[in-house]
């Protein structure tokens, strides 16, 4: 590969070294080198949001973000949220509300939702629609997706006091 060199990417809390050109799209490295297939290839042009990951908590289109831009940042993919046994509340909410048909857009929707709820734990419907407006769903599950975001906000609100109590007990 032209210009390939070892690149250390911080993904889901661990450092992974891949051998690639620094201009390689982050999405290719995540999917092809690290087998993280949560982020999807949709348009490849930064337009659909299927490839959305978090870069230091900010929703980022991995198809138009090069490896060199991602270096030094904390990258989070869908795989970094929860596990099958212990889903992240946002993942749980999307399942509870059955907010999917084909599911292709969901990873991007969930990552964008996670970032939104960290900034704004109780977003209005208008805010949810605005924040997710650049994540396209060709199946038209928008109504269920908005409900899932609202449910995720509720789940996070009920889990926060439990987590804070557990943290306090651990510190005591
Ligand atoms: S695949 Fe990245 S925005 Fe569409
Ligand atoms: S559920 Fe099919 S694209 Fe959104």
Image (cartoon, rainbow, N blue to C red):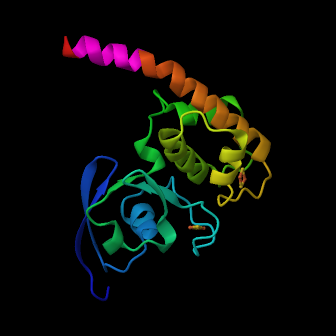
| 88 lies above or below 136 | above
Q: Is residue 41 shown left or right of residue 124?
A: left
Compared across the picture, whether 29 is left or right of 168 comes to: right
Residue at 71% from the left image edge and 49% from the top image edge: 129
| Residue 27 image position (x, y, % from top left) | 46, 66
In percent of the image, x 59 and y 33: which residue is there? 122
Residue at 52% from the left image edge and 58% from the top image edge: 52
Image quadrant where one finds the N terminus: bottom left
Residue 53 lies, in percent from the top left, at 47, 56
Residue in the picture at 64% in, 29% down: 151
Residue 5 point in image, percent of width and height: 22, 78
Asked whether residue 36 is in view, the answer is: no
Q: Is residue 76 left or right of residue 136?
A: left
The secondary structure that dominates the magenta segment is helix
Q: How many discs mark residues in the rendered view?
A: 0
Q: Residue furthest bottom?
A: 2
**In the rendered image, is residue 56 in sight?**
yes
**In-front residue for pair 1/42:** 42
- The quarter of the displayed image where residue 100 is located: top right
- Looking at the picture, does residue 121 appear above or below residue 58? above
Up/down of 121 relative to 9, above or below: above
Q: Is residue 24 above or below residue 160?
A: below
State the image quarter where residue 70 is shown. Answer: bottom left
Of residues 25 and 172, which is closer to you in this image? 172
Q: Is residue 21 magenta?
A: no
Please state the extent of the stretch shown in magenta in the rendering.
Answer: 162-170
Residue nearest the observer in this picture, 105 or 72: 72
Q: Quadrant of the C terminus?
A: top left
Q: Position of residue 137 (x, y in %)?
A: 72, 56
The part of the image, by quadrant, that contains residue 138 is: bottom right
């Amino acid at each position: 590969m032209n210009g390939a060199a070892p690149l250390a990417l911080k993904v889901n809390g661990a450092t992974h070294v891949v051998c690639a050109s620094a201009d390689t799209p982050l999405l290719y490295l995540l999917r092809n080198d690290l087998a993280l297939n949560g982020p999807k290839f949709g348009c490849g042009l930064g337009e659909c949001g299927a490839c959305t990951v978090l870069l230091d908590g900010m929703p980022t289109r991995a198809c138009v973000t090069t490896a060199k831009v991602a270096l030094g940042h904390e990258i989070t993919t869908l795989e970094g949220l929860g596990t099958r046994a212990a889903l992240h509340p946002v993942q749980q909410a999307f399942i509870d509300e059955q907010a999917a048909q084909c599911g292709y857009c969901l990873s991007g929707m969930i990552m964008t939702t996670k970032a939104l709820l960290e900034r704004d734990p109780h977003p209005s419907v208008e805010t949810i629609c605005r924040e997710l407006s650049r994540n396209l769903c060709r199946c038209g599950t928008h109504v269920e997706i908005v409900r899932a975001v609202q449910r995720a906000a509720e789940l996070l609100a009920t889990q926060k006091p439990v987590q804070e109590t557990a943290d306090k007990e651990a510190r005591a």
